Amino acid sequence: MNIKVPSPEENPAAVVGDLSVDAIREAVQDASVPVLLMVVYQVTGDEKWLDDRYRPEKVRGVAPREDGGIPEHLQDEIREAAVPAIAALLRGEAPAVDLADTDTMMRAASFFLGEQIDRRHAVIFGEELHRRTSPVGEIGEWSGAQAPGGLRAVVIGMGVSGLAAIRILQQLGIDYTVFERETEAGGVWHQNRYPGAGVDTPSHLYSFSFSYRDWSRHYELQGELYQYFNEVLDQLGARERVRFGTEVLSADYDDDTALWTVVTRTADGSTERQVANIVISAVGSLNQPTIPNVPGRETFRGVQFHSSRWEAGTPLAGKKVAIVGAGASSQQISPEIAKTVEHLYIVQRSPQWVAPFEQFRQAISPNQRTLLAHVPLYRAWNWVGLFWQHGDKIIERLRIDPEWAHPERSVNARNDRQREFLTRYIQDALAGRPDLIEKAVPEYPPFGKRMLLDNGWYRTLTRDNVSLVADAVAEVDESGLTVASGEHIDVDVIVWATGFAATHFLSSVDVYGEHGIRLREVWDEDDPRAHLGVSIPHFPNFFMLGGPHSLPGSGSFMYFMEMQARYLRDLLSEMFRRGVTAMAATDEATTRYNDMVDELHARTVWSHPGFGTYYRNSKGRVIFVMPFLNVEYWEMVRTPNLDDYTLHQVPYVPAADAVG
């Protein structure tokens, strides 16, 4: 039913909610017009706003679409209508259209995105609009079965997954302790403090639904990311529950009591035993740095370190520096340090596909920040646009077309067009340098390795004091390194930007399940298998957030962790409701899930034989990333199916009553 939206007061300085009408009018001037359009439609309920003449253009790539391709005179009309609509919201008036109906949501979202979406995505968008426009105190409101008295949980890790775990444990009423081996919270954003460190996902997509932050940049840098995760920890009131500087060494399950004994070690070497009913691993998979076993590395007389262990204060000005690797870390570090070093040698074993980055270091305008901070409906529609643009639209380009005529260079026609576009971009960026173009254009399909964003990488390669060495490191000696061609490079500093042991999940913790079976042996070190990335057969009440195959191929890692955490919350709640003491995924469900993962991975670009990637383990199996569309995994974890779990009915022993 349509509602009449009052016009702004004659006095433009009059305050409506937290903003004056004048401030609203100013804020809409450089807002996202497609987002404003949806706010106006939803608040007024006027169907005219869904007329084709206002329809935004289709989302293309990851470039911003602030005006949506809408004619300028219609943009002005939308901005004018947005002022009273936003004023109505700030006065506490409910939108005329709540979009709870899936068909209505599908129609509205398809109009907003400029292309037809399906009912499945419409349900996700409807849920998220509701979740992200709820009052702060009601976000994530949930009323399932609570934990029995005396039940305790141990959480391992205090990064993104750890915060998601804390959130659900609080909702379930579970007493918990978090162990973090680092001295501070933040996970990868505490560990990775190298120059130029930042996120390659839009800031407002890389955020929890229950904790808004007034981001200053479209793609935020390490400092504010680190601050955000610490703020979330404090907002949850959980800092006192975290034992920093405490490493978890092992976790051992007792078949008779269904209790876990967790052994921890502090920085001074002392160990303790903790007893818990539930253990949640939130250790992540990008926390174990890898440095190639290059002969002579220990003989180097200069300074050397892994990029994730950047030694603050290391003097680089006037030094000769080699950075080994050309992946994400190297491409963020190199443009920063090239400005001050005498000479930078970038040692690249294989080139990367790098996309244009129009919003690199770009600040979010004050007007945009005003709307995002004060108008949850604007913020929610902005999230929908980002989620679609950076999610399933991209994954469609990654699936192999068996009929495609050029499998050596791409996996389907869309992927090939992407290859052509990116190749032209590289050629234009390195115009006049055929020597660099030859080294910089990959031969494998786009997205085969992680797609990177150009933050000055190609501009850096053309500097007089930068050399791109397209070769592998063969040996290190006291004065530098030698590459496979035999060329020796004298340097003062070596930065190993060589990635992480991404397929070695839980490698830092020794876990023992039923009858003493050891997880490392079950997983053959680097071949982890879990049901939905969450539960492992024969390891009751041991759960993971961010486990194998649970990281999105494209999209929001934060959304996936919240989605996975909600699944675990509902699973545990059902366990409590049934009076079950412990549970673990069945062998059958786990095999079925992993067979499906492997079969689908065989039809994605990550299985292409033309390159190596940290996504694959030593046997060539894709481990790190999931092959599903966002919506496909969402459907799998929407409602827990206890038929996929072995339920243990041993007598309940509260960990709070057990002796550690």
Image (cartoon, grey):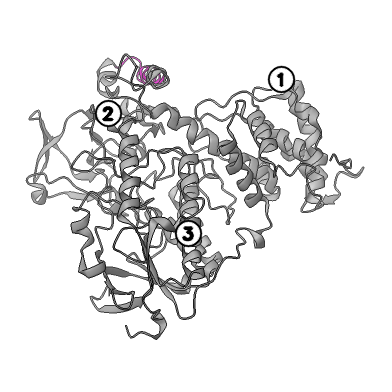
Identify residue for label 1: 71
Category of crowding for the residue at label 1, using alpha-carbon neighbours closer than 10 angstroms: few (below 14), some (14–19), many (at least 20): few
Q: Is residue 367 visible?
A: yes
Q: To which quarter of the image does residue 332 belong? A: top left
Q: Residue drawn at (49%, 77%), measured in percent from left and top? A: 148
User: Given the image, on which type of amino acid does mark 2 rest?
Assistant: His
At 67% from the left and 36% from the top, the residue drawn is 103
Q: Which residue is mark 3?
A: 164
- Whether 476 is drawn above or below 72: the answer is below
Q: Which residues are magenta?
A: 421-433
Q: CA distance from mark 2 to mark 3?
A: 34 Å
Q: Amino acid at mark 1?
A: Pro
Q: Earlier in the sequence, mark 1 or mark 2?
A: 1
Where is residue 34? Give x, y as percent.
67, 31
Q: Secondary structure at mark 2?
A: loop
Secondary structure, mark 3, is helix
Asked if residue 523 is positioned above or below residue 344 in the image, the reply reads below
On the image, numbered disc 2 is attached to which residue?
Answer: 608
Q: Nearer the viewer, residue 1 or 241?
A: 1
Which is more foreground, mark 3 or mark 1? 3
What residue is shown at x 82% (from left), y 46% (from top)?
A: 88
Amino acid type at mark 3: Ala
State which quadrant residue 266 falls in: bottom left
